[in-house]
Image (cartoon, coloured by chain):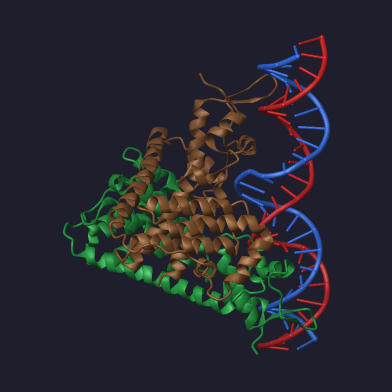
Chain colours: A green, B brown, C blue, D red
Amino acid sequence: MQQYSVKKLAKMAGVSVRTLHLYDQLGLLKPSLRTEARYRMYGEKELLRLQQILFYRELDVPLKEIGVLLDRPHFDLVEALQSHREALLSKQARIKTMLKTIDKTISHLKNETTMMNHEELYEGLDHNTAGVYRQEATQKWGAEAVETSEKHLKNLGKAGFNDLKSAMKAIGEALYSAQNQNPTSVHVQALIARHYEIIRQFWGTSGSTDTQAEAYAGLGQLYVDDNRYTMIDGQAQPAYAQFLSKAMRHFADTKLA
Amino acid sequence: MQQYSVKKLAKMAGVSVRTLHLYDQLGLLKPSLRTEARYRMYGEKELLRLQQILFYRELDVPLKEIGVLLDRPHFDLVEALQSHREALLSKQARIKTMLKTIDKTISHLKNETTMMNHEELYEGLDHNTAGVYRQEATQKWGAEAVETSEKHLKNLGKAGFNDLKSAMKAIGEALYSAQNQNPTSVHVQALIARHYEIIRQFWGTSGSTDTQAEAYAGLGQLYVDDNRYTMIDGQAQPAYAQFLSKAMRHFADTKLA
DNA sequence: TAAAGCTATGACGTAAGGTTAGAGTCAAGT
DNA sequence: ACTTGACTCTAACCTTACGTCATAGCTTTA
């Protein structure tokens, strides 16, 4: 029977060692045994239970509650796991559906995107103070970071992608380059605004405004699901992607009449 | 010029007095003046700024960041307020759209809902252990609470509503009666599962499964927006409604192939 | 055998408040 | 004038779910 150390289990489940220590202390997840030197060792059963815990944690159920839920005498582990599996399948399905919708609307692609100057680059956020924002960003992170980010954006304008997927990938690159800086900055807000503009070109006029807004907000989920944007230095860092997702949702709710 | 005490401002904005004390201490929102007795008094300007703060707080922007954002020299207050207003309009529009969709699908209403027994009542969650769950719930909250809740559900079966709106209102009643208990309980989960079943009857077979799931998850927002479910004892208590909304989203993602 | 890497416990820090506690203040009713 | 009830002040401790040391013991590898 397989046994895992704290580190191994933590890595497998994507949590910190500290988290496992805490869960042990709270009685939420006890190791199956302790070695001579009091090292914690976990078995398969504990791995499964941890999955359950994380599953409920996603819904912001407090840890105490989770303990009660899982320790219910008639809790059906198999059924719960199946539902977990279905949740993953469903997520996959949602992404597939979105891609399908995107593919359909690609056919509307007509007008070329054009070269942009600095003012246009930031117009999604503010018409008049583009220079100010840019200067502010430059002061904060240096000219190089800002220019790299802008270069990506400008390339977006010139490129004329033949599908939305590559457009998203390119804008993702730009966002990625800004990510090590302050993610709540105006600069990132400008990127998000521009992001929407570009994607809208691929949607064309198909679909109601509401549908477009929904779809756009949905795209945010892609960033969360794609490792490309959640891994930094080999460490899971979902905070940034989640902020993006939220910001996109927010943008869709706010800016679209 | 209008002046508000802490309590008044707190009530208007839907936050606690403690929150205002904290924001004052952090320098995020200072009262416009202090009375002789050091009572905090806020003016219109502070009310507006508080709106801004809450706006960004919704996106989980840390308070420190919010301070930086709002104190930016070129921050355009009017524009920000307009965008806030648009956000509200957009929310309204989303609800309207959903109602429209619902109205359209009402025409598919054909099959009558039938009387349910206990097993059926809980089938959304588990086929075999309905009795166990029921017993558990009874032990926890007493027979009366459970029976009241079930009565509502059974009435749903008998009623044969002529529109989805009243169906939702009725199931809302049932959920409301269970709300003072533990909202993460299996009992509430059962209610949610049943909730979905009933609503599905009104959707009939129209729309893809994905659309149905989306629409169902969207309904959760109604609970959040409707004062009926967010006010308890005259106090704003959005936690429950938000949990419901989340749970419904989760259910939609999990249970729908 | 010594360095490198893993582990243990304990203690403190964090964000955004909640929750008392003790004391002062204000308006209304008697 | 006096009391009552509602309101306010500051200060201090509590909370959740961990992150981040610090110190010390254990294991593996060169």
Residue at 53% over, 64% down:
B190
Reply above or below: B185 against A182: below
**Where in the figure is residue A182, as x and y percent of width and height?**
49, 52
Reply above or below: A9 against B92: below
Q: Which quadrant of the figure has residue A160?
A: bottom left
**Where in the figure is residue B195, as x and y percent of width and height?**
46, 60
| Along the line of sight, the residue nearer the viewer: B53 or B179 | B179
| Along the line of sight, the residue nearer the viewer: A137 or B133 | B133
The quarter in which the C terminus of chain A is drawn is top left
Query: Does residue A220 appear in the picture of this structure?
Result: no
**Where in the figure is residue B73, as x and y percent of width and height?**
45, 35
Residue at 53% over, 33% down:
B12
Query: Does residue B6 appear in the picture of this structure?
Result: yes
Q: Which quadrant of the figure has residue A227?
A: bottom left
Q: Is residue B169 left or right of residue A153?
A: right
Residue at 65% over, 78% down:
A46
Q: Is residue A256 left or right of residue B34?
A: left
Reply above or below: B178 against B72: below
**Where in the figure is residue B237, as x and y percent of width and height?**
57, 45
Q: How many marks?
A: 0
The quarter in which the N terminus of chain A is drawn is bottom right
Name, please, the residue furthest toward the left.
A110
Residue at 40% over, 53% down:
A249
